[in-house]
Image (tube, rainbow, N blue to C red):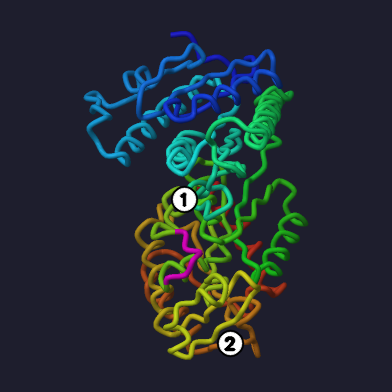
Amino acid sequence: MSPAPDAATLPLQIVILGTCDTKLQELLHLRSQVLLYAEAATVLLVDVGGDAVDDPAISISQKDLLKQYGPSTTPDLSTIPRNRVTETMADCATACLQDLHSKNSIHGVISPGGSSGTSLTSAAMRRALPFLMPKLIVSTVASGDTAPYVGETDITLMYSIVDIAGSNDILNGVLDNAAGAIVGMARAYQRRLISPKADESEKKKKKKKRIGITMFGVTTTGVDAIRHHLNATHNNYEIYVFHATGHGGRAMERLITSNALDAIIDLTTTEIADEIVGGVMSAGPHRLEAAAKAGIPQIISLGACDIVNFGPRSTLPPKFIDEGRKVYEHNASVTLVRTNVEECRKIGSFIAAKLKEYAKRPEVVEVVIPTGGLSALSGKGGVYEDGEADEALFEAVERGLGGSGIMVERVDGGVNEEVFARGVVGRLGRLIERGEGG
C-alpha cells in the first residue's frame, strides 16, 4: 500500500459540505467564489442532503456518500423522520471527513446552512476534524446560542444576515466573504504544514512541555502569577490557559485525550460547581477524567468553587433569591451565586470520586487546597467569605481521597496569592520529574 500523500505538498483542497436538495444554487455560488480566490485549488462538493441530486459540480453525491460511508443496510431516507435523516447524513459526513483527513488530502472545510444544515455539518466537523484544521459555517443561527454547534472546538461561524435561500446582493456578498475567508484559512493551514522543520533529534531537544492551566476572572491574578513563575524558572514550558466556562474545560480535556498536553494545573475547577448546582458553565459529568486516565502530572485546586455561574440577573432561578443566597453581579451578563455548605460537600465528593476512580498514576497527582480564599471574592473580608462552606469542601476532598495514594495538602494563602503560585509551580516541577522517572 502506498503511503498517504503529504497535505503540505498537495495543491490546496477545500471541502464544501451542503444539502444540495435545498441549497444547490447557493452552494454552486460558494464553489465558484472559492475557485475564483484560489484558481489552482481543488474543491470537493459533498452532498449531505436528504434527497439525491444530480449535478456535474457535485464531487461526492448523496448516493455515493451513503454507499461508501453509510451503514451496511442504508434506510430509505424518504420513510424515516427528518431528525433521523439528519443523524444518518451527519454520520456519513463524519466518516467522509475522517477518511479525507486521514489521507492528508484536505486543508479546510466550509458549509452554508440553516438550523438543520448547521446542526448536521457542525456535528461532522466536531467529530471528524482536529483543532486548527480550518472549519467555517455560514449560518442563519450564528448570532444566537452557538454552543450546540461549536462546543469545545474551533469551528468559525459567520452570520448569513438573510436566509440562505436564493440569490441576492446581501447573501452573495456574505458567501463571497466566506469563500475568501476559507481560502485564506486553508492557505495559512497549508503554510504551517510546509514550514521548515528541524530534524527529529533537534526537535526532541527543543520540544517543550505543554502545560494546561484553568482560569476564571476571579482566579486570573493567581494564574498570572503561576505563568510568571513558570516562565521564569522553566524555559522549556509552553503554557496554554483555558477559560473555565464549560467549553474551556472540555477543550482542555479534548487536548489531553489527543496527547496534546503534558501536564495540568487545574487551578480553577468551578465548572464542577456549575455541574453540581445547575449553573450555566458546566463542563459536563466527566470533568477531571481525561488527565487522570492519561496519567499525566497534574495539580488540582479548588479555584472558584465558591461560585456558581448564571446569566443576567433576570435569568437567575428564583429559588436562590427565595433562599436568601449571596448573589453577586460579576457583570451585566454574568451573575454569581455563593455555594453553600451542602453544595460544597457535594463538589468536594465529586472531585475526590473522579480522581480516586480514574487516576492511572496517583503518584503524579496532587490536590492543593488554598485555605486563604478560593477566589477574588472569598478571601478574608470578601463578599463570599464563608469558612463553614469552605471547610465542608476541604473535608469532603480529604475524606474522599483517603487511602488513594493521591496527596492532598492544605496550604496557607488564597488561590490568588503569590505564595500559593510559587508553591504550585514547585510542586508541578517535582511531579513532572517523578512522572519522567516512572
- 212 vs 205, left or right, is left
Mark 2 or 1: in front is 1
Measured from the top left, where is residue 235 in percent x and y?
75, 48
Q: Quadrant of the N terminus?
A: top left
Q: Residues within 10 Å of mark 2 (few under 14, many from 20)?
A: many
For residue 136, say whether it is visible: yes
Q: Is residue 330 above or below residue 185?
A: below
Q: Earlier in the sequence, mark 2 or mark 1?
A: 1
Measured from the top left, where is residue 216 in percent x and y?
62, 66
Q: Residue at x 50, y 19 (%)?
A: 103
Helix, strand or loop at mark 1: helix
For residue 202, say whether it is visible: no
**Label 2 to label 1, Cα distance in Å?**
35 Å
Helix, strand or loop at mark 2: loop
Residue 313: image tag? none
Q: Residue furthest right?
A: 232
Q: Which residue is mark 1?
A: 148
Q: Which residue is mark 2?
A: 385
Measured from the top left, where is residue 370 in percent x and y?
58, 76
Q: Amino acid at mark 2?
A: Glu
- Highlighted range, magenta: 278-283
Name the chief secondary structure element in magenta. loop
Q: Quadrant of residue 12?
A: top right
Q: Residues within 10 Å of mark 1 (few under 14, many from 20)?
A: few
